[in-house]
Image: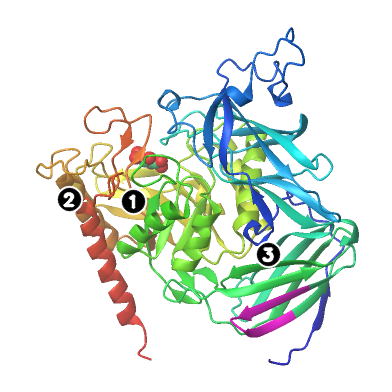
Amino acid sequence: MMRIALVLLLVAPALAQTRPELIADPPSRPSVSLDGTWNAIVDPYESGLSSRYFENAKPKSKSDLIEYDFDRSAKLQVPGDWNTQRNSLLLYEGPMWYQRYFAVEKKPHTRLFLYFGAANYLARVWLNGMKLGEHVGGFTPFNFEVTDKILNGKNSVVVEVDNTRRPEGVPGIHTDWWNYGGLTRGVKLIEVPETFIENFKLQLARGRSDQVAGWVQLRGGGQEGAEVTMEIHRGDLLVTAQKARTDASGYTSFEFPVQLELWSPDHPQLYEVRISAAGDHLTDQIGFRTVATRGSEILLNGKPIFLRGVSMHEEAPYRGARAFSEKDDRTLLTWVKDLGANFVRLAHYPHNEDMIRLADRMGVMVWEEVPVYWELEFENPAVLENAKAQLAGAILRDQNRAAIIIWSIANETPINPVRDAVLKSLSEHARSLDSTRLISAASDKWQRMDADHMAWNDPLGEYLDVIGLNEYIGWYGDRKVEDADRIRWTFAYPKPVIVTEFGGGAQYGRHGDSETRFSEEYQANLYQHQLRMLEHMPQLAGMTPWILMDFRSPRRALAGIQDYYNRKGLISDRGQRKQAFGVLEKFYREKAQEARDAQPAK
Ligand code: GCB
């Protein structure tokens, strides 16, 4: 084994950091899965709270009046949306009470946390009748400590999940996707030692390919002045080992030199990172790469890269439900790769953690987004707080994934001074949590200057590293598909542009000429003209057309064609490829070849 020098690194500055308390790297923790069958009570009139469902009470005598009974209620599978588990729940929006029992054998000197991958939208959690807490936001994980409340033997957990759309919510009342409710991702009981590594970040330092930087947050009695060891391994080889010491709040930051093979879509190299402190140990598989901009280019590991992407929702192929399994994720990302893409826009909210881990392994770069979507109550301070918390939740969960190169803070929000200030603040928040990735947002706020000149001039551009442009020329509005050939774009900011959306609807198997709406021919022709336009778009650094696969949307009512599906997919919800898939694939294969040809011969 290679000899290594253990260097004592910077002791972190005394600055106390406030970060939401989220356990990092749950796959590497001992845990008990609480997935499976839960009892569930539908509560459309919101009587559960006043009737104290959270107590999971049973009549003590035959005269006792208790008007609910979890044990005899209907069942729901977790993880999973409720909408697709029972016909009567397809459009249900409101509270649902989940309950299940689980057995625990308590171990000394350990702490236990209930960990939820996601619950859409509001979750209130009780253990053995005692309230653990609440969480707002349908797509970010959360955990509650249960060490003092858990019983040796049988326990009962009750979760009220409420997916009511709210004007002050993030997202708000209107979206173009299904409002899947429920415990949509896994639930588990995680065990950690008394003092434990709660979260950490370990990535290349901003702009450096020879320097790793990050931080570790310990929690528990011995958190102050603890020695933290970080090791990076490649197979059996120890690449480096470093030490740092925590401050009074259990926090330490560090930076040290490294020589690593860099992660890229062509070479998705992952290293095993081991972190130890105060008797606790974590391992994670981490890739290292830099991402930056230079003028209107995006640079991966210092070299310009064109992002050949596609947008997608977190919807399961073949069964029109919220995706949650590794199988769902693999099918979707395999289709992304089949398209010749190297990039995916995970719209419009953080997708499940396994999806990002798989993207790391498969070599797909990722745009991750928070659901700051369309009209929100931007003037309500709670909206900003909520959006910030969701952004922090996503970053704390995924900050060690090389695949993620962009945090997106919004999609198609209306321009006004209050919204501008909110998004400025969100961009600053994202940068303060993670300075190593690019910040972007998708915006459709462009103006038609004359017949063929479009100008993107959203003031939001000032706060972004990369501009995201959504445009639907040839689908919405009065422009013809063919007009795209003549249209010229200008951008008010000299930054890289990703066309984050374009597209049109087509029903798989529906044929007509290229002017027939919803035919495959119309969509394929639209793609052809769009690609022609994009070829001469200045500042273009990538694209993620809308969208990989048809997805459910309550706004898409056209009978016989949409049937409550947005049909802009390149692939149908049954996995059938439409003609436009081939058009984009050909374009991407050529782009990839151009990029290979441009590389100096080895
Ligand atoms: C958009 C939205 C996206 C919609 C899409 C559409 O601009 O960002 O969420 O689904 O258009 O199909 O209209």
Per the rendering, the mark at residue 98 is none
Q: Residue at x 54, y 67 (%)?
A: 402
Per the rendering, the mark at residue 548 is 1
Q: Secondary structure at mark 2?
A: helix
Tag 3: amino acid: Lys
The segment highlighted magenta reads 229-241
Please give left or right for residue 331 compared with residue 481 in the image. right
Residue linked to disc 3: 201
Q: How is the image coloured?
A: rainbow
> Which numbered disc, 3 or 2, marks the residue closer to the eye?
3
Tag 2: amino acid: Asn
Residue 164 location in percent, x, y?
A: 55, 26
Q: Main secondary structure of the magenta part?
A: strand
Residue 69 location in percent, x, y?
A: 64, 20
Task: Specify whether residue 231 is painted magenta.
Answer: yes
Residue 390 visible in the snapshot: yes
| Label 2: few (<14), some (14–19) or many (≥20) C-alpha neighbours in 10 Å | many
Residue linked to disc 2: 525
Whether ligand 1 has any atom under 8 Å from the Cβ at mark 2 is answered as no
Q: Are marks 2 and 1 in contact (CB under 8 Å)?
A: no
